[in-house]
Image (tube, grey):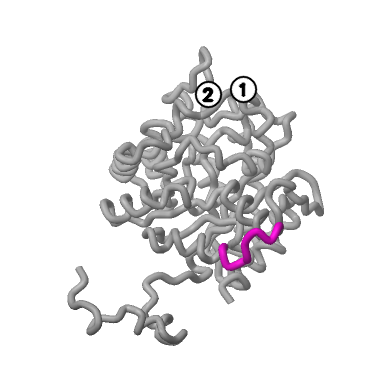
Amino acid sequence: MITGKYPNLRLRRNRKESWSRRLTQESTLSPNDFILPIFLIDGSNKKESISTMPGVYRYTINRISQILDRAIKIGIPMVALFPKTKNSLKNEVGSESLNENNLVCKAIVEIKKKYKNQIGIMCDVALDPYTSHGHDGLIRSNQIINDETIEVLINQSLLQAEMGCDVLAPSDMMDGRIGKIRKALDKSNYQNVQILSYAAKYASSFYGPFRDAVGSKGSLKGDKKTYQMDFRNSDEALREVALDIKEGADMVMVKPGMPYLDIIKSVKEKFKIPVFAYQVSGEYSIISNAIQKKLVNEDVVVESLMAFKRAGANAIVSYYADRIDKILK
């Protein structure tokens, strides 16, 4: 509540000089606030551009050190691994997700071998990079089946934990998967492996470039509206978050980011739990293309990222993370 009135109260006084604005700013950004996504591809000595995501690349495992070295140098706390699986390795049940020699598992081993605990590793728990139909779960009679999918996700989680993953991030939106994954981890002596739940993940049109990056765009049959959330709903997001916290989530994600700042704020205010925001591929590509075409200047990047912190996000998954030191100068 504002007390006082003009002319005794002049809010512009605190804005009159740069030093004063810095002293009174309510939100800040630093590399500590970011998670860097890394796209993986098979092969050797490849760095492959992604046409729909300017400035973002896919890396073979023997090339990821160049991006990890920089991430560690500038102070990024964690990377998130996403594979582009060969079509020949995909099938209806996503069995490649359980292969200890898949791209993600091999990358975890290499990162831990070289960097130990200098940087955290977050792994996506979902089947869409591995299924021939592009969905996050198993399909029966044209329906995504919940409970059978969870059994696969449990095994995927245990495998990633065994390889050395620090933070498991179930993004599948199956009902009840957090509790079952947590129980399986604890039973297998992985009590310290954290769970970042994609608790409020919406069926969004902003995911297109990501699906292109992981190679699932062309294979996706139908949409994901029977398991991802309706973008018209906000109360439902709070119910989803509440359930995942009760089941053992250590942190929760809101995805996409900018169109859902109201959800980030509501979740943070209600649950007081670490809340992460994902500035998804569509958001990134819209901003980056607008900058390239000189429709806006580069300052919009900081403005867009600060919005997440202002809304209450503890951390941001962003494709700008590897350049954040330069962006914040």
257 is higher (above) or lower (below) than 204: below
In the image shown, does 17 or 265 lie closer to the viewer? 17
Is residue 83 visible to us here?
A: yes
**Mark 2 crowd level (few <14, some 14–19, many ≥20, 10 Å Cα):** many
Dot 1 falls on a residue whose secondary structure is loop
**Mark 1 crowd level (few <14, some 14–19, many ≥20, 10 Å Cα):** some
Range of magenta residues: 293-300
23 is higher (above) or lower (below) than 109: below
Query: Where does label 2 land, which residue?
Result: 138
In the image shown, does 218 or 139 lie closer to the viewer? 218
183 is higher (above) or lower (below) than 12: above
Quarter assignment of residue 56: bottom right
Query: Where does label 1 land, which residue?
Result: 92
In the image shown, does 40 or 52 lie closer to the viewer? 52
Q: What amino acid type should be assigned to the residue bearing mark 1?
A: Glu
Residue 72 in percent (x, y) is at 60, 68
Left or right, 101 with reference to 172: right
For the residues labelled 2 and 1, say whether their Cβ atoms are less than 8 Å apart: yes
The tag on residue 180 is: none
Quadrant where the C terminus is found in the figure:
bottom right
